[in-house]
Image: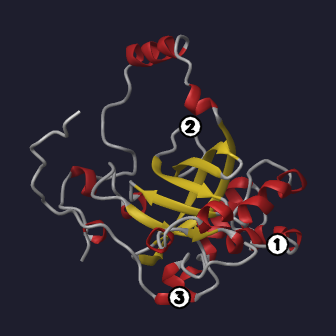
Amino acid sequence: MASNDKVPVACPASTGEGKEPMGDPTKTTTAMLDKGTAMFQSMKPIKQMSLHVCSFACYSHDPGRQIEVHMYGHRVNQDFLQCAVYDSNSAKAHLIGIEYIVSEKLFESLSPDEQKLWHSHDYEIQMALLVTPRVPELVAKPELKNLAKSYGKFWCTWQIDRGDRLPLGTPSLMVSPQDVSLGRIKPELVKKRDEEHGISTESLKPSREEICGPEKKNLIADYWVRFRKGFAIDVVETDMKRTAPFP
């Protein structure tokens, strides 16, 4: 059993009551200091985030475990997006991971071993599982067409669906929904998402019919679909390097 598939050792962070992160409520003085420093700091990396999409993800080592995700993306260039992944779009959302998204061109430049860690996006877009909250479909369509041809690598650092009240254990590789039994998102998750955001996944599907995936779908991506093998991280104790490289 891999480290990120193990149930955490019993502790308040893994067995405590409630879903809120552990810790005391923020003091008024701390909140005032935060607001004060925010007036002087640029926050430039955060301000570059211009894209918000909501979708679902499955654990690579256990696709039956599925979560709703909200990705806030910064477009580094035409072929590369970097995204902070949250469990909701509320002010109290938890940062649960990161996803990198590359174009088909960049993906094809990766080694086969690296490509195994990436997933496609076309199915979740065509099935309207991936949506752009509050953005009209007509406005979102060009971006959706681009994303449908892209590939992503998503590391989940906080298994909130397990009840963890702090980020515990190792990161987990996540995969996208796919048209296979374990890759189909549970209807109750979709229903909950739709009700919360006032959308209808079923009514969006007809508008997605014309959206196409990569020109030549790479068979190494979505590795688990073809080979029924996932990926998990093991923590291994190792000797530290004790010599510094010569300048």
Q: Distance between the residues labelled 2 and 1?
A: 29 Å
User: Which residue carries the number 1 mark?
Assistant: 205
Q: If the image is split into quadrants, where does the N terminus sit?
A: bottom left
Pointer 2 or 1: first along the chain? 2
178 up-or-down from 15: above or below:
below
Q: In the image shown, does 172 or 159 lie closer to the viewer? A: 172
In the rendered structure, which disc, 1 or 3, sits on the residue that comes first in sequence? 1
The secondary element bearing badge 1 is classed as: helix
SS type, badge 3: helix
Residue 180 image point, x, y percent:
60, 87
Amino acid type, label 2 = Ala
Give the image quarter of residue 149. Answer: bottom right
Q: Residue under circle 2?
A: 91
Drawn side of residue 50 relative to residue 140, left or right = left
Amino acid, disc 1: Lys
What is the secondary structure assignment of the residue under circle 2?
Answer: loop
* Quadrant in the rendering for residue 191: bottom right
In contact (CB < 8 Å): disc 1 and disc 3: no
User: Tags 2 and 3 in contact by the CB under 8 Å rule?
Assistant: no
Q: Residue 226 carries which label?
A: 3
The kind of residue on which mark 3 rests is: Arg
Q: Against 143, is 116 above or below?
A: below
Position in image of residue 106 (x %, y %): 62, 60
* Mark 1 Cα-neighbour bin, 10 Å: few <14, some 14–19, many ≥20: some
Which residue is at 38% across, 26% downward?
A: 26
Circle 2 crowding by C-alpha within 10 Å: few under 14, some 14–19, many from 20: few
Give the CA separation, mark 2 to mark 3. 39 Å
Q: Which residue is drawn at 22% across and 50% down?
A: 12
Residue 236, image x, y percentages: 17, 63
